[in-house]
Image (cartoon, rainbow, N blue to C red):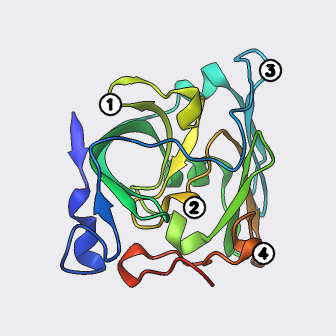
């Protein structure tokens, strides 16, 4: 069963397509560098920081977690949006519950295989629509789109959704990620065109 969450835009504006965006039928590939290599035997998903219990899950263990399939829209900061993507994965709240987030946690830093990081306020992550995705439109997530695992954040520009994610760090104070340190918006709301800080 697919849960349709494409109407979440109503929280932020009256138009599904954010201002300054154009719709595309494709799913372009953009990244700061090339596609990193990984193997299921050595990859792990780790959670640490302001949590009750650090986690370290193998690829197989991660795939055994409770999952959901959602129909979402995807907004790239470069100006394109693609509608009705079907993503399958694990919700952020599921991971937060497993680790037991401490009361002093306020921010989240996502870590990727290639060294990329991106950050969000914890309150922005604790949504069922924030997914750790391993399937796209019914197929295993392609490596150039972030496989084995990427984050999707349909209420934010897509640079907030790290490709090739391998870890989540819960922080007691904000820390900016790769693009945020280079002038991109920390809040990244597409309906307010929050592209740059």
**From mark 3 to mark 1, how far is it between C-alphas?**
26 Å
Residue drawn at x 70%, y 72% is 180
Question: Closest to the observer: 84 or 183?
Answer: 183
Task: Give percent across and percent down for residue 155.
Answer: 40, 66
First in sequence: mark 1 vs mark 2:
1
Task: Give percent across and percent down for residue 188.
Answer: 52, 74
The disc at residue 66 is none
Secondary element at tag 2? helix
Judging by the rendered image, the residue that carries numbered circle 4 is: 172
Secondary element at tag 3? loop
Secondary element at tag 4? loop
Q: Characterize the local packing of mark 2: few (<14), some (14-19) or many (20 or more) Cα atoms within 10 angstroms.
A: many
Foreground mark, 2 or 4?
2
First in sequence: mark 2 vs mark 4:
2
Judging by the rendered image, the residue that carries numbered circle 3 is: 42
Question: Closest to the observer: 117 or 103?
Answer: 117
Please tell me whether residue 41 is drawn above or below residue 72 in the rendered image. Answer: above
**From mark 2 to mark 3, how far is it between C-alphas?**
25 Å
First in sequence: mark 4 vs mark 1:
1
First in sequence: mark 3 vs mark 4:
3
First in sequence: mark 3 vs mark 1:
3
* In-image side of 27 versus 62 (left or right): left
**From mark 2 to mark 4, how far is it between C-alphas?**
19 Å
**From mark 3 to mark 4, how far is it between C-alphas?**
29 Å
The disc at residue 137 is 1
Residue drawn at x 18%, y 79% is 14
Foreground mark, 4 or 1?
1
Foreground mark, 2 or 3?
2
Judging by the rendered image, the residue that carries numbered circle 2 is: 160
Task: Give percent across and percent down for residue 116.
Answer: 75, 52
* In-image side of 154 versus 104 (left or right): left
Please tell me whether residue 87 is drawn above or below residue 109 in the rendered image. Answer: above
């Amino acid at each position: 069963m697919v849960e349709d969450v494409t109407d979440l835009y109503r929280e932020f504006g009256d138009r599904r397509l954010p201002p300054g965006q154009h719709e595309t039928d494709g799913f372009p590939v953009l990244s700061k560098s090339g596609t990193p290599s990984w193997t299921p035997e050595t990859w792990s998903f780790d959670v640490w920081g302001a949590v009750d219990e650090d986690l370290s899950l193998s690829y197989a263990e991660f795939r055994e977690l409770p999952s959901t399939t959602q129909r979402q829209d995807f907004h790239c900061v470069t100006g394109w949006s693609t509608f009705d993507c079907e993503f399958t994965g694990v919700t952020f709240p599921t991971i937060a519950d497993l680790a037991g987030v401490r009361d002093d946690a306020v921010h989240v830093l996502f870590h990727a295989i290639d060294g990329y990081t991106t950050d969000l306020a914890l309150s922005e992550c604790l949504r069922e629509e924030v997914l750790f995705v391993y399937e796209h439109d019914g197929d295993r997530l392609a490596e150039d789109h972030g496989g084995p695992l990427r984050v999707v954040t349909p209420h934010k520009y897509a640079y907030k959704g790290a490709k090739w994610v391998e870890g989540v760090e819960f922080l007691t104070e904000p820390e900016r990620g790769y693009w945020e340190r280079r002038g991109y918006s920390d809040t990244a709301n597409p309906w307010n065109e929050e592209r740059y800080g």
